[in-house]
Image (cartoon, helix red, strand yellow):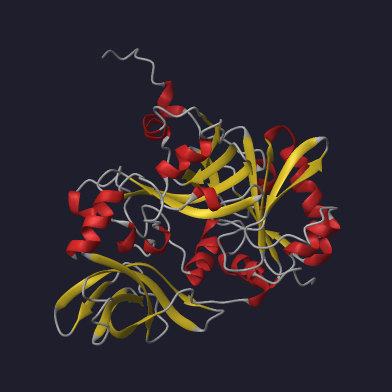
Amino acid sequence: MTGSTNREHFRTPLLHAPFHARIEALMEGEHWYDWAGYAAAMMIRDEELEYFAIRSQAALFDLTPMIKYRIEGPEAEAFLDRLTLRDVSKLKPGRVHYTAWCDDDGHVLDDGTLFRLAPDRFRLCCQERHLPWLADTALGFDVAIAEETDAVAGLALQGPTSASILLAAGFDIEPMKPFALAEFDHQGSRLLISRTGFTADLGYELFLDTAVAVSLWDRLWDAGQVHGISAIGYDALNRARIEAGFIVANADFVTSETALRADRARQPDEIGLGWMVDMAKPHFNGRRAIASARAAGTLRHVLVGLEIEGNEPATGSIVYHGAKTEAGVVTAAIWSPTAKRNIALASLERPFGEKTNDGLWVEIYAPRELRYHKLKKKARVVERPFVRLPRRTQTPPVKF
């Protein structure tokens, strides 16, 4: 190469979602991170204030960078049944379900939400890009697949006053049950609202064309002034999702396409998604490998919820059994203000977390006055979610 080689790609900025200007105007620092090529907010004002906005008011979070695929055609249902773990024939139009999909070895490629917009039209939302895999899996099916991440803007409105804000904005969401999907008009464009979220709280997700996205933000912001609406970044959302016991790809498990070592990929039963696997339906990716591992008892890992003594979050800590036996690693941890407990998600090696739950402890390195102190804290396996809020499922939702 010579010195005159074009290097513009090194200076290509991150993309801006339609809501970027609104979020930037509210941001009190420069707390951005790269989410799928977009500049996304890690924190807007203060992480704790944003967390409490989720739990006591309403929080608005930009979902636009989430990867979105449009899947449609006469055999869209059959294709998705072949691709994913759950029985797609049970997903009716106007409904959403959480799902995952695997490679031929039964290792999870990703998890996400599947929206059935019509009998032959779906939207699949996920963390990673999978267009080549989807295209290969679609061979032989009469189906069209297209990524629509950049064309469809998304917002999450979460918290106890979220329903009141949507009603004040003119959207009749009262009849919607959890995982319901409904269509509304916004400035002549189709707005899809689902009663879904990543917070274990009452909440909704909204999707529409990017051309009219900013006006939707303004409509919600104006309607939310008397209901305590706030914009939030990922740090606050991450706190809420841990309380919900939800997992994140390439944080709580390594997706099979990104795993650099063969023993890092996980089957659904190893990350708490075994309940999704529908062995009664026809063949799907990974079915044979999952059935074989179950029959042979070769599943090596299990993802569990932990409650840990004290109040120091155990992020990244090693989990031990007894004096020195390493049992696994903590993948996510916080002190939960809502549950009033020190909680964590951890990937353990069986039988720890499955048959052996006594004698677990974690090693936490806590910074105190320029030194790290090693803390050994007892841990016990507990059920997820760590936080259960009745308002999340109450229909019609309570108005605040």
Front one among 192 and 210: 192
Q: Position of residue 155 (x, y in %)?
A: 65, 49
Residue 302 versus residue 99 in the image, above or below? below
In the picture, residue 211 is in which quadrant?
Answer: top right
Front one among 13 and 220: 220
Residue 203 versus residue 218 in the image, above or below? below
Q: Position of residue 305 (x, y in %)?
A: 38, 74
Residue 315 versus residue 155 in the image, above or below? below
Q: Quadrant of the N terminus?
A: top left
Front one among 211 and 391: 391
Q: Quadrant of the C terminus?
A: bottom right
In the picture, residue 233 is in which quadrant?
Answer: bottom right
Residue 129 versus residue 86 in the image, above or below? above
Q: Position of residue 397 (x, y in %)?
A: 75, 69
Camera sees residue 359? yes
Front one among 343 and 7: 343
Residue occupying image coordinates x 41% and y 42%: 83
